[in-house]
Image (tube, rainbow, N blue to C red):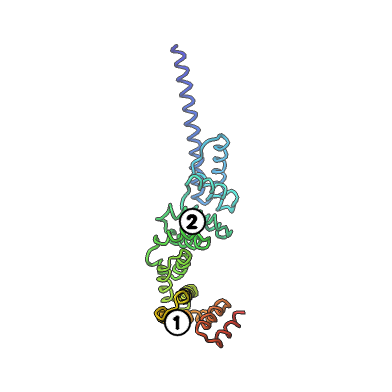
Amino acid sequence: MRLKITLILSLFITLLFVGCSSTSTLSKQTDKAGTAFSAGDFETAFNLYDTFIRDQESKDKEVNGAIYGAAAKAALQLNKFIEAEKYYKMAFYKKSGDADLYAQMSEVYKKMDNLSKELDALAFFNDHFSNDPRHNTLKKRLFELYVESENWGKAADLWPSFDLDNQAELHLMELYLVVQKVLDKKETADKYAGLILKKDVTNRNALEWNAEKYFWKAENTYQAALDAYEKNKTNKQYTIMLKTLDRVTLDFKRALKYYQMLYKLYPSKTYAKYIANVYMRFQDKKNADYYLNLAK
């Protein structure tokens, strides 16, 4: 019985030693890969990482996500994009990899014009590497892509995380104005249109916002006043309509100013048509016909 127990213990110790030896060997292999990478020997680093990963996967063993990330970075240095992307995807799946990997992959996808994959890399970077010196620059790029891909809600949610200096940058304010316009946040859009025009009086997005705002405010009020009078043709209602039309005229004049500025800066049939519509409301046939002709 004692002999049997002794044999079992001996076998257990032998297996434990073999396991530890194997783990130690694998650890040394990845350590060598890391050393080679640090020394700029990316070929050796990649081969060691690649061999390690293949060996582990062939035995259905788990590979640490950081190893996938390191292999991807080594592959990128060698312009082995297929291998880099394969291992990057595994690192991404395991929510692993360092800041360099995600910054580099976002740049690769940018050059490839692959918006969705660039977005994924940037979003991960933004969420996990806020202390990295590249964070603010890449966050701006993320915001741009949210707008470009029409992820309006995500763009709006990201905006408050910018500091006041960033929020005062003209390009970012323009994008935020677009977001607020699409989300129908009129007060915020109005605020940023005003801030933009203080920095750039010729800014197309801000001028368009003001032109459309005043035109449709005037037009909708005009139609509502006419409808109310048609339903109740009394002297009182007629007086109300006349007073309303005074306000409408003022707003149409404001819209006209912005559309004329837009047409001068950025000639467009659309702007010409709006200008013609305003002149028709003013019963100015000569100017209305002139701009209708430009709108053809």
**Taking the image as drawn, is residue 218 in sight?**
no
Q: Nearer the viewer, residue 64 or 186?
A: 186
Image quadrant containing the C terminus = bottom right
Query: Residue farthest to the bottom?
Result: 286
- Residue 295 position in % (x across, y down): 59, 79
Q: Is residue 281 above or below residue 146?
A: below
Residue 122: which disc?
A: 2
Q: Left or right: 193 with respect to 269?
A: left
**Taking the image as drawn, is residue 32 in sight?**
yes
Image quadrant containing the N terminus = top left
Q: What amino acid does circle 2 point to?
A: Leu
| Callout 2–callout 1 Cβ contact below 8 Å | no
Residue where numbered disc 1 is placed: 249
Does dot 2 land on a helix, a strand or a loop?
helix
Q: Left or right: 77 with respect to 128?
A: right
Instruction: Give the residue drawn at x 39%, y 79%.
Output: 236
Query: Residue farthest to the top?
Result: 1
First in sequence: mark 2 vs mark 1: 2
Disc 2 from disc 1: Cα separation: 49 Å
Instruction: Give the residue drawn at x 44%, y 79%.
Output: 248
Query: Residue farthest to the left?
Result: 164
Q: Is residue 281 above or below residue 137?
A: below
Q: Nearer the viewer, residue 137 or 184?
A: 184
